[in-house]
Image (tube, rainbow, N blue to C red):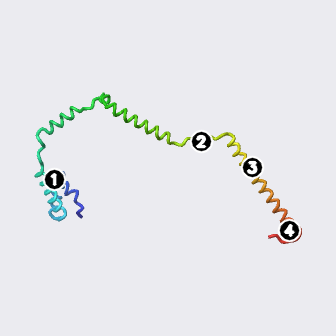
C-alpha cells in the first residue's frame, strides 16, 4: 500500500477514531483506491474469521480449571521432588568433574639443581657476550688506529 493514511484506515475499520476523524477517513477511503482495497480486505478477513469460529468443547473450561487446581505449586512443593533423579544428576556432575579434573596436565616437578644449572648457563652466556663485544670494539679501534698512523685510508 502506498497511501500515507494506512494507519487511520486501520483505526477506522476497528472503530477507534473520534467521530470527526472517522468521517474524514471515510471520505478519504472512498476517494483512495488503496484505502478502499484495505478496508474491503479487512472486512473479508473479519467475515471469514467470524464464520470459522468453532465452539469450545463442552466442559473444557471446567476441566482446565480442575487440572490447574489439582497441580498447584505450594510453598513446600519443592520438598516433594524426585530425590532419586536429583541424586543421579548430582552423581553425574561429580563423575564428570572427576574425569575432567584427572585429565588436566599435572605440573612437572623441577629440581633445584636443574634451575641452578640453567641459571649458570645463562650467566655464562651473558659473560661471554660481554667479553666478545668488548674485545671486538678494541680490535676494531686498534686496526683503524694502526691504519691512520701508517697513513692509509680506512674504509
Q: Residues within 10 Å of mark 4 (few under 14, many from 20)?
A: some
Reading the image, the residue beneath label 1 is 19
Pick the quarter of the image with the N terminus.
bottom left
Which residue is pictured at 85% across the width and 65% down the height? 145
Instruction: In this rendered view, identify the residue nearer to me: 12 or 136.
Output: 136
Which residue is pictured at 45% across the width and 38% down the height? 97
- Closer to us: mark 2 or mark 3? 2
Mark 2 or mark 3: which comes first in sequence?
Answer: 2
Reading the image, the residue beneath label 3 is 124
- 88 sits left or right of 122 in the view: left
Reading the image, the residue beneath label 2 is 108
Q: Secondary structure at mark 2?
A: loop
Which residue is pictured at 11% across the width and 47% down the height? 54
- Closer to us: mark 2 or mark 4? 2
Mark 1 or mark 2: which comes first in sequence?
Answer: 1
Image x and y of residue 119, in percent:
70, 45
Residue at mark 3 to residue at mark 4: CA–CA distance = 35 Å
- 43 sits left or right of 88 in the view: left
Q: Secondary structure at mark 4?
A: helix
Image x and y of residue 95, in percent:
43, 37
Reading the image, the residue beneath label 4 is 147
Q: Secondary structure at mark 1?
A: helix
Amino acid at each position: 500500500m502506498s497511501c500515507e493514511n494506512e494507519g487511520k484506515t486501520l483505526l477506522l475499520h476497528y472503530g477507534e477514531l473520534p467521530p470527526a476523524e472517522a468521517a474524514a477517513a471515510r471520505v478519504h477511503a472512498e476517494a483512495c483506491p488503496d484505502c478502499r482495497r484495505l478496508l474491503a480486505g479487512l472486512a473479508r478477513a473479519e467475515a471469514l474469521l467470524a464464520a470459522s469460529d468453532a465452539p469450545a468443547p463442552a466442559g473444557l473450561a471446567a476441566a482446565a480449571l480442575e487440572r490447574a487446581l489439582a497441580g498447584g505449586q505450594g510453598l513446600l512443593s519443592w520438598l516433594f521432588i524426585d530425590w532419586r533423579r536429583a541424586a543421579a544428576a548430582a552423581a553425574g556432575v561429580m563423575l564428570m568433574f572427576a574425569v575432567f579434573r584427572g585429565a588436566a596436565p599435572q605440573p612437572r616437578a623441577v629440581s633445584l639443581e636443574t634451575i641452578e644449572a640453567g641459571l649458570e648457563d645463562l650467566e655464562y652466556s651473558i659473560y661471554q657476550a660481554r667479553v666478545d663485544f668488548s674485545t671486538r670494539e678494541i680490535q676494531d679501534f686498534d686496526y683503524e688506529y694502526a691504519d691512520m698512523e701508517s697513513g692509509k685510508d680506512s674504509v
